[in-house]
Image (cartoon, rainbow, N blue to C red):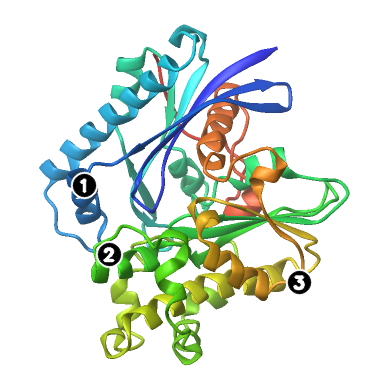
């Protein structure tokens, strides 16, 4: 039996929205259509303001952006379907991750907050929409993240080799896939992915990201600075663990050293190396048997970052594209898969990854 689901994802890089129309036939997964909508500058600026640690924003601003993003998500679904001959009525459901405004799993009253009103998505598209995936896992005493390892296991597991999937968005996370299906899956956020590099180049060159790592590559890595940053307790905390851009921010950098007393490009090179080395350290510590690393997420396009990873790891490092899924498509497809799990009354979290006490069915369903 063939089923169609749509996944919607807006990640911690705050750059736009990914939409994937995915076909499921048994355990087989096939991408039918993919669309990306970059945020206009005005929306991106407003989201960045909302997302700043301890940001002072009004409920009116928050509510209006929740609604506005709901319309953008819905319109992107319509654009996605218009590129095919598939009617909305043929789609089983939409899985919408939304956009994370704040992720705080470690405080006394833990929460994770996403915006992009699913009521609007369901109403405008006529398609049942599954959303609010993280909070049920948190209710079960989990971190609410990362959630993509369950999908990674479904599509990238190989019985003949130990693999590690590295997803580099604003935050980087890994999924450790032992070749023995019965072995425990490990997955966690390793720390910053692109977020610090994006913030630093925005500050100095007013660019949203460092294309291919070109600016960072003009600098010189200051290993003393990287050593300072690596002293942060997060890197030495055992999984399960998750983090966000509200933690790994420029104020986080400034507490360790006076960034403005260094050449800007040297800081950028050092921040790139921090991402690379903390990913490699995590793999060496928690997945020493890894035989192959597959990279997905926006960081897969940063040639300098990938080169640094390859220099500090002893197994092949390849794009997920070689294994059937383009690195830009994986997360949106994951939320199509998670929506399917929810609709079919199946758990979507891996409790050994998030630290939840139970495997739980994730999200709420907003009928189309």
Q: Nearer the viewer, residue 218 or 1?
A: 218
Under tag 1, what secondary structure? helix
For the point 56% across and 33% down, which residue is it?
Answer: 338
Q: Quadrant of residue 241?
A: bottom right
Question: Which quadrant, please, contains the N terminus?
Answer: top right
Label drawn at residue 41: 1
Give the Cα distance between marks 1 and 3.
41 Å
The tag earlier along the polypeptide, 1 or 2, is: 1
For the point 56% across and 58% down, which residue is it?
Answer: 173
Q: Residue furthest right?
A: 160
Q: Is residue 271 something one can see in this rendering?
A: no
Q: Nearer the viewer, residue 367 or 66?
A: 66
Q: Quadrant of residue 265?
A: bottom left
Query: Quick check: 58 left or right of 362?
Result: left
Above or below, 162 relative to 308: above
- The residue where tag 3 is placed is 314
Q: Are marks 1 and 2 in contact (CB under 8 Å)?
A: no
Question: Which quadrant, please, contains the C terminus?
Answer: top left
Label drawn at residue 202: 2
Under tag 2, what secondary structure? helix
Give the Cα distance between marks 1 and 2.
13 Å
The percent coordinates of residue 139 (x first, y second) are: 47, 46
The percent coordinates of residue 276 (x first, y second) are: 56, 71
Disc 2 residue crowd, few under 14, some 14–19, many 20+, Cα 10 Å: some
Above or below, 56 relative to 89: below
Disc 3 residue crowd, few under 14, some 14–19, many 20+, Cα 10 Å: some
Q: Nearer the viewer, residue 44 or 84?
A: 84
The percent coordinates of residue 281 (x first, y second) are: 64, 75
The tag earlier along the polypeptide, 3 or 2, is: 2
């Amino acid at each position: 039996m063939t089923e169609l689901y749509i996944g919607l994802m807006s990640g911690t890089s705050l750059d736009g929205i990914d939409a994937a129309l995915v076909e499921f036939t048994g355990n087989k997964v096939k991408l039918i259509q993919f669309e990306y909508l970059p945020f206009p500058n005005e929306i991106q600026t407003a989201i960045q303001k909302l997302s700043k640690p301890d940001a002072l924003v009004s409920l009116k601003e928050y509510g209006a952006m929740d609604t506005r993003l709901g319309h953008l998500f819905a319109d992107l679904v319509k654009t996605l379907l218009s590129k095919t001959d598939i009617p909305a009525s043929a789609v089983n459901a939409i899985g919408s991750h939304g956009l994370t405004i704040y992720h705080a799993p470690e405080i006394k009253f833990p929460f994770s907050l996403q915006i992009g009103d699913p009521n609007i998505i369901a109403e405008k598209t006529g398609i049942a929409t599954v959303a609010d995936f993280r909070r049920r896992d948190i209710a079960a005493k989990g971190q609410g993240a990362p959630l993509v390892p369950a999908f990674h296991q479904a599509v990238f597991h190989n019985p003949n080799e130990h693999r590690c999937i590295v997803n580099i968005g604003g935050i980087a996370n890994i999924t450790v896939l032992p070749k023995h299906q019965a072995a425990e899956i490990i997955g966690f956020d390793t720390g910053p992915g692109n977020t610090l590099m994006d913030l630093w180049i925005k500050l100095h060159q007013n660019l949203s990201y460092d294309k291919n790592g070109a600016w960072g590559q003009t600098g010189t890595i200051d290993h003393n600075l990287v050593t300072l940053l690596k002293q942060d307790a997060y890197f030495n905390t055992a999984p399960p663990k998750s983090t966000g851009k509200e933690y790994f921010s420029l104020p986080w950098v400034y507490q360790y050293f006076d960034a403005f007393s260094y050449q800007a490009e040297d800081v950028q090179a050092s921040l790139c190396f921090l991402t690379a080395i903390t990913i490699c350290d995590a793999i060496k510590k928690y997945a020493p048997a890894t035989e192959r690393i597959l990279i997905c997420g926006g960081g897969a396009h940063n040639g300098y970052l990938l080169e640094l990873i390859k220099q500090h790891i002893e197994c092949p490092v390849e794009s997920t594209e070689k294994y059937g899924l383009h690195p830009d498509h994986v997360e949106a497809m994951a939320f199509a898969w998670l929506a399917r799990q929810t609709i079919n009354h199946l758990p979507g979290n891996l409790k050994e990854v998030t630290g939840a006490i139970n495997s739980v069915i994730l999200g709420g369903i907003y009928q189309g």
